[in-house]
């Protein structure tokens, strides 16, 4: 292994390795899929990561894009104190102390949006 003994070191551990690697076909790009409404859609990695934050029920397809479904608006009902034909009479106009029912008193009615 030295120059005095007249031997030289050659490295031929795997002949033809780089040639074989050069002849390999290119690796196909990774495809990402998301299932919405029972149908698979091909998406980018960024869109796949975004959709993983939500469940399938929260997403929909709109104009070819994956978007969040709008949140449902709840119909709220409010009770309002109104003058009616027959209603309550309050002690010192305090709504927490009804005296009794009278003609032309006030009562709680539900108004809807």
Image (spheres, rainbow, N blue to C red):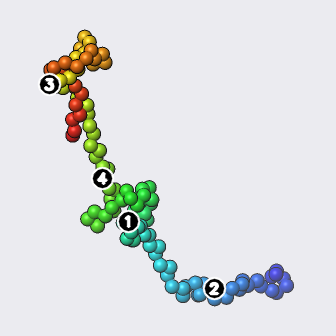
Q: CA distance from mark 3 to mark 2?
A: 99 Å
Q: Which residue is mark 2?
A: 17
Numbered mark located on residue 93 in the image:
none
- As drawn, 87 above or below 22: above
Point out the residue furthest to the right here.
5
Q: Residue 56: x, y in percent?
A: 40, 61
Callout in the foreground (1, 3): 3
Callout in the foreground (3, 4): 3
Q: Residue at x 31, y 18 (%)?
A: 96
Between disc 2 and disc 1, whose residue precedes? 2
Callout in the foreground (2, 1): 1
Residue 46 in view (yes/no): no
Q: CA distance from mark 4 to mark 2?
A: 57 Å
Label 4 element class: loop
Q: Residue 21: x, y in percent?
A: 58, 84
Q: Residue 7: x, y in percent?
A: 80, 86
Q: Residue at x 19, y 18 (%)?
A: 102
Q: Is residue 101 left or right of residue 8?
A: left
Label 3 element class: strand
């Amino acid at each position: 292994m030295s120059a005095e003994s007249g031997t030289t070191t050659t490295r031929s551990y795997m002949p033809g390795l780089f040639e074989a690697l050069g002849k390999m076909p290119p690796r196909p790009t990774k495809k990402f899929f998301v299932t919405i409404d029972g149908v698979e859609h091909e998406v980018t990695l960024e869109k796949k990561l975004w959709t993983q934050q939500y469940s399938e029920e929260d997403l929909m397809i709109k104009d070819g894009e994956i978007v969040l479904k709008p949140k449902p608006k709840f119909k709220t009902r409010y009770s309002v104190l109104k003058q009616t034909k027959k209603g309550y009479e309050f002690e010192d106009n305090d709504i927490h102390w009804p005296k009794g029912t009278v003609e032309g008193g006030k009562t709680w009615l539900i108004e809807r949006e």
